[in-house]
Amino acid sequence: MADDPRLRSPGPGAAADPDDPGRAGAAGPGAPGHAGADLGWLREAIELSRRCPPSETAFSVGAVLVSASGRVIATGYSRERDPTDHAEEVALARAGAAEQLAAATLYSSLEPCLHRASRPRPCAELIVAAGITRVVVAWLEPPVFVTGGGAAWLRGAAVTVVEFPELAERARAVNAHLIAG
């Protein structure tokens, strides 16, 4: 997997391929921390969630990891490489041990998980371990498969969590088959 060309970042100064799921180095809506930029990056995460292979047992989630200067470090979406992949997990794996993660913002269409059956560590723990201090989400995880709580746990670990409920319906629409009723 390490030699997979989809996981390679473009060289310095090179434009990222827009079809590359990692999109490392690509510019976007702007520097994190401004409402317009945050909404734009979160919309990109929601669009990524539409790429998820369908599942009756897991949410479709997209994640975009953005540097403080507004460049894509990495992206990911649920079930992208493996049926048990979570979006945040894929983006963090692509980012590796980048020095810029402490100042980066992780945009996720759904609150990062705090409980997980398919891997030993939930996404909330992976985020803290990576040194990320700011997370932006569209909606909080409903208790369909496991209890949520990732946002509260992250806040308790000194991570700033921002929710944009005005984008929640867009994120829920991708998962309508799971939450209908």
Image (cartoon, helix red, strand yellow):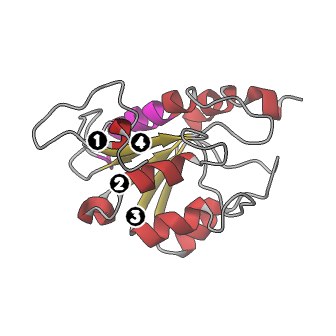
Q: Position of residue 60 (x, y in %)?
A: 64, 36
Q: CA distance from mark 1 to mark 4?
A: 8 Å
Mark closer to the chain start, 3 or 1: 1
Q: Say which amino acid is labelled 2.
A: Ala
User: Which numbered circle lies on residue 95?
Assistant: 2
- Residue displayed at 47% across by 73% down: 158
- Residue displayed at 80% across by 33% down: 178
| Dot 2 crowding, Cα within 10 Å, few <14, some 14–19, many 20+ | many
| Dot 1 crowding, Cα within 10 Å, few <14, some 14–19, many 20+ | many
Q: Secondary structure at mark 3?
A: loop
Q: Mark 3, mark 1: which one is toward the viewer?
A: 1
Question: Is residue 158 covered in magenta?
Answer: no
Question: Is residue 34 covered in magenta?
Answer: yes
Q: Position of residue 63 (x, y in %)?
A: 48, 43
Which region is colored magenta? Answer: 32-45
Q: Say which amino acid is labelled 4.
A: Thr
User: Which numbered circle lies on residue 24?
Assistant: 1
Q: Tell which residue pokes out farthest to the right in this image.
A: 181
User: Which numbered circle lies on residue 68?
Assistant: none
Q: CA distance from mark 3 to mark 1?
A: 17 Å
Q: Would you name the residue on which mark 4 appears?
A: 75
Up-down: is 30 above or below 85? above
Mark closer to the chain start, 1 or 4: 1
Up-down: is 146 above or below 7? below
| Dot 3 crowding, Cα within 10 Å, few <14, some 14–19, many 20+ | many
Total label count? 4
Q: Position of residue 80 (x, y in %)?
A: 55, 38
